[in-house]
Structures are given as structure tokens and as C-alpha cells.
Image: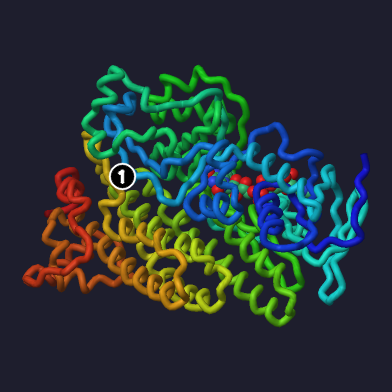
Amino acid sequence: MTQELKPHYDVVIIGAGLAGLALSTQLLKYAKKTILLVDKWDDPPRPTQKVGESLVQLSGYYFSKILDLEDYLMVNQYLKYNLRFYWQTGTGDDFWEDVSSSSIKSISNIATFQLDRNHIERHMMEKAKKDERFQFLGGVRDIVTNLSETDEPHTIAFNKGQTTCTWVVDCSGRGGVLKKKLGLEKESPIKHGSTWCWVEGLVNYEKFTDHTHTEVLMDRSRQLTGNFPFVNATSHFCGKGRWFWVIPLHGITSLGLVYEHASVDPTEVSSAKKMIDWVCKDWPMFARDLPNRKVVDEGRFISYSHDCKQTISKHRWAMAGESGRFTDPLYSPGSDLIAIYNTLVVDAILTDDKDLLEEKVAMAEQVERAMYEAYVPTYEVSYNALGDQETFTLKYTWELAIYFGFYVMPFINQLFTNRQYMQIFLRRFAIFGPINKSVQQFLGDYFAYKHENGIKGPSEPLNIEFYSIQPLKESETLFYQIGLTLEEAEDQTEKHVERMREFARYIYAHCYAAVLGDKRVLLNAAFVKSLKLKDTKFDPEMMKAHYEQFTQSEDIYDWNLNPFALEPFIGALVENTTAMPV
Ligand SMILES: Cc1cc2nc3c(=O)[nH]c(=O)nc-3n(C[C@H](O)[C@H](O)[C@H](O)COP(=O)(O)OP(=O)(O)OC[C@H]3O[C@@H](n4cnc5c(N)ncnc54)[C@H](O)[C@@H]3O)c2cc1C
């Protein structure tokens, strides 16, 4: 049946994926606008399974609270149990014998979910279709947009007709309809690939063991890790510059290998079968299970990251989701960026005043770019650190604390659209650019040093609680800072900046202590104060000479954190290598 198009819509959205449907849901809830959503497929999502399942706090909050889908999520999707990271300590054949972990044992107070993407997209589509302001048109090809730079509306034409609209938002994912039309493509410095698949049933790696059921239940490591089903986490089985994900969905399990090209040859993992074989060699415990599973679907990108020169314009067009920028799936920022971009796009669509719109759009572009760019060093510079529990624990707790304070706290206080706050925020956030780059380079080099010198992690499984790192634990308290006034939010941001400065100091000091095999390094006030947060290089000889200047100093540094949180690693490095004199 051919559908009648209206002569004009307030908003035309191209692409009915996660971004386009979330934007439709948000607009229907918060703005009285008419929407035409178009997609190249007749009835998306197609039966093929969609990748991009794990939500973290910001996107968890967005889908459950802002889009008000909490009831749906609680009933239809798995509640997620944080992110868990694993390393092999022995042969990697038995989960309860050979595996070290770093994780958070308590469940997040901001609910996060493992999304069956096809299920939630179908739900949002059905819900939107019940609203008379919304119209969906499938099977749309050959889209031609004629973007207006005056008060006149845009025109948009395709195989099934044409119409006009006030705003066009491109959510066509990798189709990149507007990006291509406007020549806004930009290369990303991140060169990583991924092969993934879905297999039937639940891959519960807690069962990959020769231990009896009772032994597993009574394992003393549970004193640290507890009893929540580990498999409900996004589980990361790590190695140098790579990780293998296990994500449970109802009736199927999502599995994927993500890698930097320097660590895994893409041709060796060019299909689900090859990827599973590769993983079973890398992590032998998976050979107990995966070769017997039926693969229900699969996918692959050799290089998935991309940037964009501009994603929103005063001339009433915007992009959201993968049609604009995409960095990396590690820590699942994809849906977070959808949440942030959609929120800024809705705010712009709700702004009629032209001057105000121009100011808002300029700020939105800055925020969108800053949110994206802050992630780049995380993926570009120190991805190798995935290969070592100590280095990665420092990296992740640092990044997660930044995330809780600079992403989650402003988002749950609805401050991303508050320009006054955002101006201060961007200044504060900018302080972190150089510090973050320096920390990431330092940790990447620290890992390379350990790797080149054959320094292995602990020979017995070690379970690290991320919240034993105090700045991260304190950052989590920001989840409860809700309904803040502007002054209160600024105050929290200021405190967070100070917290993170101390955290950077601790990361450097810990690595010095580990390299020099001397815990006193961590208490030496004169030395700790001498560390330059934006410019500390990892070079063992230089580090030794630097510390030697302060060995006579007796003042104790007054930390607000426990400097011995990662004590098991101090000394181990010197015991393990002949490369460094004590
Ligand atoms: C390996 C990998 C793992 C990931 N894991 C996670 C994760 O755990 N958590 C997370 O949050 N994110 C993750 N992501 C990111 C996540 O997949 C994306 O953020 C998300 O899928 C983007 O949704 P979207 O709506 O922009 O694109 P899509 O879902 O791809 O939707 C685009 C829509 O546009 C339509 N379309 C395309 N071209 C045209 C055209 N020319 N005309 C009309 N319609 C068109 C398509 O049919 C489709 O319906 C991952 C990404 C990768 C690569």
C-alpha cells in the first residue's frame, strides 16, 4: 500500500536504527513535532542480528529514564553487571584455576542493560507508530536532500515521493547520507577491527572448569568477587591490544574479538569460525564450549572508526549515531554518543530563535567533538595495555573516573544543554586533554616495557576490586548528586578536577615504585610533588635518576587515596626482570 506523505514535516530522520528510533522517541516525548522517519529497508530491523549491545551508565540512564523505557528494559532485556576484565595466569584452560580478574563487585546504581538491538528497535518503532505525529516510510532509496540556508524549508526527495521539512537529521549509520553529500568525511587515527557472532544458548564461562559444582560455589575468591552471575557483565578476555567479549542476550550469546591491527592479523579472524578457532587457541578454556555451538549470525569490520568534520548546523541539519563519528566498542561509548548527540539535537530543534539557535549549535558542535576526541587517546595510544592486568587496571580506573565525573554527572543533571555550565565544563575538561594524553602514553610505554622484558603478571589468580582505587570509588558518589544547582554542579566539577589530578599523580608514582621496586617512592612528598602531570615520560633510566634526587627527603606525601592499592605489583616487576637495577 502506498503511503500518503504530508507536504511538510517538522523533522525528517534518515535511518531507523538505534539512533533514529531513539531520536524519534525523544522528540515524541519532549517536543510536539511531526516526524517522518525513513529507512532503506521496508520493515527494519531486518532478521539479521545487530551489533552494539552493551549499555553503560550514561546510555543506561538515557534509555531507561530520559526515553522512559525502564518498564520495557526490565522485562525484556538483561540487567547488566558492569564490565569485567580477565587475564590468564596459567594455561588459561580452567576459569577457576587460571584466570585473574579486575572488576567491580557491586551492581551499578544507575541501571545498565545488555540490549538485544533488534528487540528494542522493534519496540521503539511499534511505540512510535502509535503516535499520530509520527510516520515511518520504508523501502526508501535514492535520497536527494536540498538543504536550505534561508528560512525556507529543506526539500527531500526519494523513490517514493518528496516532501519538505524544517530539520533533517541523518541517522543512517555507516550509510552516512549527509556526510557524503556534504563532503564531511574525516579519517580516524584509530585502526582497529572486529569479528563477531551470535551463538545459540548462554555461554557461561563460570562452568569452564574441572572443579565440582560445590567447589565452584565455595571458591574462596568469591570473598572478593561475590555471587552475582559474572556472565551478566560485559566480559572482556584480554590480551595485548585485543579483547574478546561475551555478552548474554535472551537465548543467544554475543561473542566478538576486537583488536588493533598491530596485535591480530585481520585475515586470521576473517569469519566467525576462524575467530572462534583463534580465540580457543588464545584462551583454551573456550575450547570446552564454543566449537560445539551453533552460530546464528555473524559480522566483521576490518577498520570501524571514523570521524566527521561537522555534525550539526545552524542551517537545521544534524547527524547522530554512527553516521557522524565512531571511535571504538571498548567501554561501549556508541550509545553514549547517541544519547549526547540526540539530546543536543532535540534542544536545537526546540529552539525557534535564530540567534539563539546559532549559539546553541556552535556549543553543541564543540561538546560533541570534545566528547568524541577525549576517547581517541584511550584507543589510539594505550590499547596494548589490555595485555596486562596492572597497567590496564590503572588505565581503566582512570578512564572510568573521568567518565563518571565528566560524562555521567552532567548528563544525569541534564546539563549538556546548559550553555553556562558547558562553557565552564569545556574549560575544565580541556585541562584534561594534555594530562590524559600524557597518562595514556605513559601507560602504553609502561606496558611495552613490561612486555618487551617478558614481565608476566602474577602466577596465581589475583582478583582486583576496581573500587579499591579511591578516586574511582569517590567518583561513583557523583551518581547521587542529582538535581544540582549550577553552582553546585560547578563545585562538583571543580572537586572532580582536583581528584583526577591526584589520580594522575598516583598513577605515575605507582609505576615509578613498581619500576624501582621500592614502596617508599609512593610516600616521598618531595618526589611526588615533583611529578609533572602533563609531561611525565616512561623511561626507566630517567625515572631512576629523577627519583634519586629525592631519596634523602623524609616528608611523607599526604594522599587522599590509598597509595598501596596495587601493592602486589610493586617489587614483582623487579623480581621478574634483570633489565632494571634495584
Ligand atoms: C564491533 C562493534 C561493537 C559495538 N558494541 C557496542 C556496544 O557494546 N555498545 C554500544 O553502545 N555501542 C556499540 N557499538 C556501536 C553501535 O553499534 C552503534 O553506536 C550503533 O549501532 C549506531 O546506531 P545507528 O542507529 O547510528 O546505526 P544503525 O543501527 O546502523 O542504523 C542505521 C539505519 O540507517 C539505515 N540506512 C542506511 N543507509 C541508508 C540510506 N542511504 N537511506 C535510508 N536509510 C539508510 C539502515 O538501514 C539502518 O536502519 C559497537 C560497534 C561495533 C562496530
With 484 as the anchor, is 505 left or right in this view? left
The C terminus lies in which quarter of the figure? bottom left
Please name the residue that numbered disc 1 is placed on: 389
The N terminus lies in which quarter of the figure? top right
How packed mark 1 is, by other alpha carbons closer than 10 Å (few <14, some 14-19, many 20 or more), is: many
In the rendered image, the vertical position of residue 547 relative to residue 335, given as above or below: below
Q: Residue furthest bottom?
A: 355
In the rendered image, the vertical position of residue 496 relative to residue 64, given as above or below: below
From the Cβ of disc 1, is ligand 1 less than 8 Å away? Answer: no
Q: Secondary structure at mark 1?
A: helix
* Residue toward you, 11 or 195: 11
The colour scheme is rainbow
With 10 as the anchor, is 323 left or right in this view? left
Which residue is located at x 36 percent, y 71 percent?
Answer: 497
Q: Is residue 193 visible?
A: no
With 97 as the anchor, is 432 left or right in this view? right
In the rendered image, the vertical position of residue 227 relative to residue 517, given as above or below: above
Which x, y percent locates residue 446? 30, 54
* Residue toward you, 346 or 103: 346
Classify residue 103 by image quadrant. Answer: top left
Residue type (three-letter) at the residue carrying disc 1: Gln
Which residue is located at x 84 percent, y 63 percent?
Answer: 165
Classify residue 492 by image quadrant. Answer: bottom left
Which x, y percent locates residue 389? 31, 44
Which residue is located at x 41 percent, y 69 percent?
Answer: 432
Which residue is located at x 52 percent, y 43 percent?
Answer: 54
Which x, y percent locates residue 11? 78, 61
Q: Is residue 387 visible?
A: yes
In the rendered image, the vertical position of residue 484 relative to residue 539, given as above or below: below
Which x, y percent locates residue 146? 86, 64
